[in-house]
Amino acid sequence: MIDPEHGLPIQKQAEVLEISRSTVYYEPRPISDEDLWLMRRIDELHLNYPFAGSRMLRGLLWQQNLEVGRRHIKTIDPYRDCPGARRVACPRTSCRGSFDRAV
């Protein structure tokens, strides 16, 4: 994709690809073993409690003497990329009738 050895400067290569220059230099940090273990534990809890959000997961983890913050759970939650995966019931607004129907 980006070739530092190419005659075209990296800035121009990034412009052509329509990506920011900081993306070119970004190197992701490895996930710690502790976070991987916590992700597996959250996955197990999701199997038993598919409706659990970050607050409930925090409470369940605290019952097992694992002091984890709600924001950290939201950060490493493996299901966060598919928002509808855990939805059990429809949201209140979609259960109501349509507003453009005749009364």
Image (cartoon, rainbow, N blue to C red):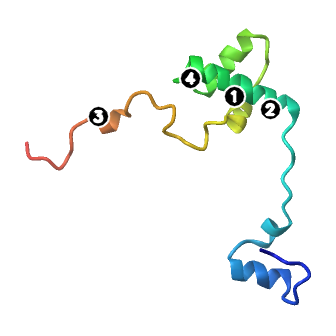
Residue 3 percent across, percent down from the top left: 85, 78
Tag 3 and tag 1, C-beta contact below 8 Å: no
Check residue 70 in the rendering and tell me which mark sits there, or answer none: 1
Of badges 2 and 1, nearer the viewer stands 2
Image vertical order of residue 59 relative to residue 23, above or below? above
N-terminal-most mark, 2 or 4: 2
The image quadrant that residue 14 belongs to is bottom right
Secondary structure beneath label 4: loop
Q: CA distance from mark 3 to mark 4?
A: 21 Å
N-terminal-most mark, 1 or 4: 4
Of badges 1 and 4, nearer the viewer stands 4
Q: CA distance from mark 2 to mark 1?
A: 16 Å
N-terminal-most mark, 3 or 4: 4
Residue beneath disc 3: 95
Mark 1: few/some/many CA within 10 Å (<14, 14-19, 20+): some
Residue kind at label 3, given as amino acid type? Cys
Residue in view at x 87 percent, y 85 percent:
6
Q: CA distance from mark 2 to mark 4?
A: 19 Å
Residue beneath disc 4: 52
- Furthest toward the bottom, the residue is 7
Residue kind at label 4, given as amino acid type? Ala
Residue kind at label 1, given as amino acid type? Arg
Residue beneath disc 2: 36
Secondary structure beneath label 1: helix
Image vertical order of residue 37 relative to residue 101, above or below? above
Residue 15 percent across, percent down from the top left: 72, 81
Secondary structure beneath label 2: helix
The image quadrant that residue 62 belongs to is top right
Residue in view at x 20 percent, y 46 percent:
99
